[in-house]
Structure formats: C-alpha cells, structure tokens
Image (spheres, coloured by chain):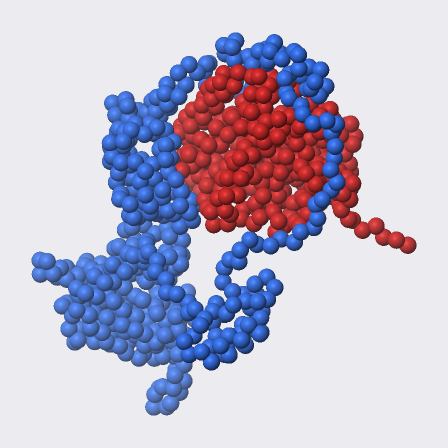
Chain colours: A red, B blue
Amino acid sequence: MSIMLPAPRPELALGLDCPLTVLDVDGTRVPSEVLDPHLSDIDEHALTNLYVDMVRVRRLDVEAFALTRQGHLVLWPPLLGQEAAQVGPARALGDKDWVFGSYREHGFALLRGADMGEFSRIWKAYAHSGWDPQEIRMAPSQIIIGAQSLHGVGYAMAAKMDGADEVALTAFGDGATSEGDVNEALVWAASFQAPVVFLCQNNQYAISEPVGLQSGVPLALRPTGFGIPSMRVDGNDVLAMHAAARIAFDRARTGGGPTFIEAVTYRRGPHTTTDDPKRYRDEAEVEAWTAKDPIERVERALERMGANMEAVRAEAKIRADQLAKEFRAACEHAEPPAPDEIFDNVYTQPSKRLERQRLEHRAFVSSIEAKA
Amino acid sequence: MKTFLLPDLGEGLTDSEIVAWKVAEGDTVELNQPLADIETAKAVVELPSPYEGVIAKLHAGEGETVDVGAPLIDFDLDDGSAVPASAPAAGDTVAAADDEAVTPDAPGPVGDEPDVVTAPASAPETNVAAQAEAAAPDDKPEKVSVLVGSITVHGGKPTRSKRTWDVEPFERAEKRGPNRAMPPVRKLAKDRGIDLQSVRPSGADGLVTRADVEGAGTASATSASGAAAAPASTREKVTGLRKHTAAAMAKSALTVPHAATFHQVDVTETLALAKSGDASFLALASRAILLAAKRWPDVASAFHADTNELERFAHVNLGIAVSTDRGLVVASVDQAETMDAVELTAQIKDRAVRAREGTLSMEELTSSNITISNVGVFGVDGGIPILNPGESAIIALGAIRKLPWNHQGEIVLRDVCTVTVSFDHRVLDGREAAGFLADIAAVLERPALALAR
C-alpha cells in the first residue's frame, strides 16, 4: 500500500524559473507562448486605457496617503508599485464576477466603480465598508489576513452549485499564504474544483518580514501541492497580469477549476501610514524596484508603438487630478455617523434587547456631550 | 487664513516632534508639497501641505514637541482668507483653486467618467489608437499575430529556459538585535558575571554558544584591560508625561521646604473590615485621612509664596497617585469628604482605570489638594514623597506586613502598615503634621473610632 502525500508538483506551475512577462522593463514586447494567445485583442487603444487606469489608481493612492498625513483619513495602506498587479486582473473581470480582496485593493475598488465619497468613509473609520458589496460585486475590505480567500472559495462553490456563470477572484498578499485560511481555501477550492482565481500579490514583505523568511521556494509552488495549477507572473507588467488573469478566468468559467497567480511585485511605500519601512529594508532595494515601475514600462511600450505620449500623459493627468480632487472633496466633507448607528446593522430585524442598548448608549453619549 | 492643527500621524499618538521644516514663513506652497519631517513614536514621516497658499506662521520650531490637535501652521489662502472659516464653501474654495492650477481645461463635472475602457472623451488628437493604426500598418506582418498595433517584437520563437530555482533557506543580510543564547548558556553567562552582549557569537544563526561564554570568561580573566566592549550608555529625549513629571517634581522639591513624619500602624481591624465589606482598604484609609483632615484643616491648603497667602480649600479634593504605562498621574476625587467609603471605593477605582486608559479630563488631573500615594503596592514600607505642586500634604501608605506586635499585652502577629506624611513646612509644623498622622493612625487601628469623629 502506498500513501500519496501532498507534495509540490512543479509541472503544475508556470514561470517558476523566471516570472512570465510580455513587456520588458524598457517597454519592448517579449514573446510568451503562454500569455500571447490571450492578448490578441489588446491594441494600442486598450493598452492606453490600462495605462490611464494605472495612473488614476496611483493618483488616488498618493492623494489618500497625503490626506492621511493631513488628518483627513485615519489610516491608509498604500499600493504604490502594485498598480499593474491590480489593474491587469481587474480589467479581466466579467460584470458578474466577484472580488474578495484585502485592505490594499484600492485599484480593484476604483475600477469596479466604488463611489469615492463612500470609499473615503471606511478610511475615516466612519463605515464598515467603502461601497455596497452587492452593487459593485466586491466584498468589503478584509483586514484579517487571508480570511477573504475562504469567502471567495465559498462564493465560487455556491456559484458552481447554482450553475451560475460567475467567477470569484480573491486577492491577498505573500504573508497570507503562510496563514491557515489561505491553505484551507486552497484545499476546498481543489476538492470542489471551485471557479475561483487566487491572486497573490507578492509584494515581498509581510509588514516587515521578507518573503524569503516565509518560503524558500517560489510562492507559486505552494498551490501545486494542493493540485492547483499556478502561474508566477511579473506583477509589474500589466499586460502579463491581464493575460494571466484571462487564462485563470477562462479555466474557471469552463469548468477547469481554481488557478493561482503569484504576481511578483513590490510595495514601495510603507505597510500602512503608521509603518516605517526604513527600519527593515534598504533604500537600494526600493530604488531597484522603482526602476521596474509598472507605469513607466507601459509609457515606453506606447512610445515604441508610436503613440503620442504627450497627449496620453496629459489626458491621464487630467483624469487623475480630477479623481484626486473628487476624493479630497469627499474626504473633507464626509460627516461622521451618529453614535448609535452602530446598532443598525447587527440584525436585520430590531430586537428589544438591542433597542434597549441603543437607548442606553444614546443616553451615555448625551451625558458626555452635556458635560463637555 | 487657515490654521492647520497637527493631526494624529499614527494610530493613537498624543504628540509629535518637528524634525525639520522644509518651508519658511512667507513661502508659497502647493497642495501636497512636503512641508516638514515630523517624528512620531512610530516613524519619521513627511507632512504634505493640506492647502495651496502662503505660509503665514509656523507655530513650532525644529526640535519642538507639538501636541496632537495643537496649531501647527497658519496659511494665507489665495482667496480663502476672505471666506469665513465656518462658510460651507471653504473646502470647495481650496479644491477649486487646486483644480485651476493643475488642470486648466479639465473636462466634465466630477465623477462623470469612472470607467476609462470607453474612448477618451476629449479632443480628437488624444485618440492615440486611431493615430497608431494609421501610423503603423506596415508593421503588421512582423509582430506577433495576437497583437494589433505597432508593438515591437524581437527575438525568435518563444523558448522556455530550464528551471533553475532551488530551495534556498532564508538568511538575513545582516545580524540585527541583541545577542541570543540558549537558556543553559544564558545561565552560565549570568553565573560567571559575563554580559552576553559583550560575547562574540559563533553559533548557527548568530547564537552565543557555551564555548563562546567560556572563552570570554578566560579572556576577561587574563586581560585586565577587558577587550570586550562594555555596553554603551544611552541618552534619549524625555517627552510627554515623563517630562511633565520631571518639571513638576523639580519645582516642588526646589521651592517647597519638605519635612516628613512616619508611623507604624496596626491596621488589622481596618483590613478585616475591607475584606468583609464593600469598601477597599484604600477607601477606608482615605476615610481615616478625611476625618483627620477635618480636625487639621490646614493640611488641605496651598501656600502662595508670591503673595504670602495661605489658601484654605473649602473641600478636600483627594488626589490618588496612579502609576500608568505612560508615567505617574494624580487623579482627583473631588469633594471626597462628602463620600462614604463605598462610594470612595468606586470613585478611586474609576480614576485608576481611566488614568491607565488616559481618558481623565484636565480638571480631574489638576484639581486635587491633598494626595495619597499607595507605595505599598510596590512592596515597600514607605518613603518620603515629594508634594504634588500646590498642595501642603501627601500621605504614603506602605505595604501591609504581618509583624510581631504588642497587642493587648501579648506578642502576636498583626497586620502592620507604615504611614508617612510629607508636608510643606511653611504651612504646617511638626505638631500639626504629627497630630494629623496620629489621628489617621488612631482610626486605622480602631475603625470604630470613626463613629465618634
């Protein structure tokens, strides 16, 4: 009798030796037998749109970071450097697909159509979600590391049982792959062949712990131990990310089951606005990754395609500044919720006990206000 | 004019230090332009300008610590100064000014275009796709069939190189933090009086081994000069509560002539009362102090040296010294003489809890006029406390110990506590202070006496 132990199966992973890429750092197009067939419709116009998306996502991120320093937001986890890793897959989503992300998925939120006024409220600690999850088909930001992977797999399993044509994408970081939740999610996704896409943005640090401390092998090898195929992709290459996501979505939609994408990227900012990355990493490392900037790479590619970059840049700047202005205005004008609103969403039906607690809380708050 | 208040730059910080200004008064600044480097307890961060305008005033200099919520910078805004601060349009004014500066011909209203998959809405010359299609039809045969447009393709047939990744154990680039060692080695070092930090580690992962410690022992025994570097002294900036406490204690110690008297008290009966009822020992002791204060009203008073006046307070506001993570605070239970011991128990507990939470009001932190310091919780018998500024007496309660005691003519074990009174000798002489202390002791020894007082 022999027992099959779960063991990594490198043959299930692509890009282990060198992350899959189609755009070089200098913007030259490099062929990829895996990704190219899924980029046939991406013309200069489509690439321009991806470029504008990334510029807008970055502008939102930079503005929100400044707004936190200026006291308008309570906290901000920046995504600077990860724009391509989010924009590529976000633009591969179908209208009915769902996103289950972490707290750093601002690119997904923006491109899924979250209202900036609502979006600002979660980072002002005024609301539990920055959008209506049903409306934009994106679950609220998940602060518990990796928990959203289980939610995504659960949704995908339900979609499969319903026979619905929906795929769940769950996004998390490198640190989450060391959590039980993500490993459980991989087990369930594999067992039920759930239509789910695992998007791991390997930004190299779990707060201060480098990824090498968590895994001596590429993260893309981990899901293969569960029998889930994976791709290790250049996360700063928006086209490669877009193509890889399309492959994963196609597999899920056609009954192929789960796919894992490791986006090899880098978090150039701090973990959040309260973190000081200088305490755990070298500036030289940040500079090396800045040279691999996902946005500049597309600019060079568009230049090589003969695009009028001056006009594209101007257009992108207008849209990005408009977004920043809109977001700042929303932050400055947001009104805090009434103190007893916290009781509104505990149960769908009010209960006597909860109403009593609401009245007690209201009395307590007014007693403080009376003193002040 | 807009005044920018220092925000909480971390999560739950109370103050920050200005490391360096990058602008000066009179400078014109843009929105989000870096203004200063500011150090919080967590990190040095850059402060981006919240407004576009002129710096009218910097409220703090470099090296100064500013409280969260205190004014930091005054801005003269282009047209904002004409708008009253309460006007609802104030925020819009700033945003509009920003818009005009950055995007002279921004199209459309706010939020009209959340999805850029559709073609850009502005001038036709920005339609790069159309341009490119016209510009690069010749390239079509040479590029990968999957792409339309003029993307350059170089290299021949796609190839996949052999996998070269390997399992690599993680190694930190440099050793950080203090030396570490297994427990038996730590014990060995301790036994030999060798500082682990002075030993050069040779073990795996930078661990100090037994041989390292033994080698260090020999080395320090043989070379009197001590080749191993001794741990260096450190200096750090004192901020916040520590700074405040330091200033208050120095002022009190240097301006008030302190004297003290102490007394060992058999508190067995009071302790039994505390164990059997709803009032804590500290509250019962407070009752004893309040009863004594009624007989010696000068203990709740303040000496004003500038006017040579003695201020006698109408009520006894009992200060409770609480040791918190952030430092020492004195929280007041106002009009304590009006409360019974059960209410005092609740009030003292409330002050202690909120002192540790940091939620006491400024009033509660400053209104006391006589203070109790329960130093017994640290296991010591007593000490001579320094007066809380503006007060004339402070009582220290020591640890309660079982001591052999002359009780009704027999030597028995009794619960004994040392009570110390420090006092302002300008206000009280030894007679008053001793009388006050003796009255406290009398009630603590025989709580029933309280009925008579």
- Is residue B312 shown left or right of residue A44? left
Residue A227 falls in image quadrant: top right
Q: Is residue A204 above or below residue B1?
A: below
Residue A131 falls in image quadrant: top right
Q: Position of residue B424 (x, y in %)?
A: 18, 68
Q: How many marks?
A: 0
Regarding residue B24, the answer to whether it shows in the image is yes
Q: Residue at x 70, y 18 (%)?
A: B142
Q: Residue at x 20, y 73 (%)?
A: B259
Q: Residue at x 62, y 53 (%)?
A: B170
Q: Position of residue A28 (x, y in %)?
A: 62, 26
Q: Is residue A340 above or below residue B214?
A: above
Most distant residue in the front direction: B155
In the foreground, A371 or B28: B28
Q: Is residue A161 above or below residue A219?
A: above
Most distant residue in the right direction: A1
Q: Residue at x 34, y 73 (%)?
A: B398
Q: Position of residue B131 (x, y in %)?
A: 57, 11
Q: Is residue A367 above or below residue B153?
A: below
Regarding residue A155, the answer to whether it shows in the image is no
> Which quarter of the rendering shows the C terminus of chain B?
bottom left
Most distant residue in the left direction: B307
- Is residue A75 shown left or right of residue B91? right
- Is residue A159 shown left or right of residue A62? right
Q: Position of residue A335 (x, y in %)?
A: 41, 30
In the foreground, A114 or A309: A309
> Which quarter of the rendering shows the N terminus of chain B?
top left
- Is residue A64 shown left or right of residue B241? right
Residue B11 falls in image quadrant: top left
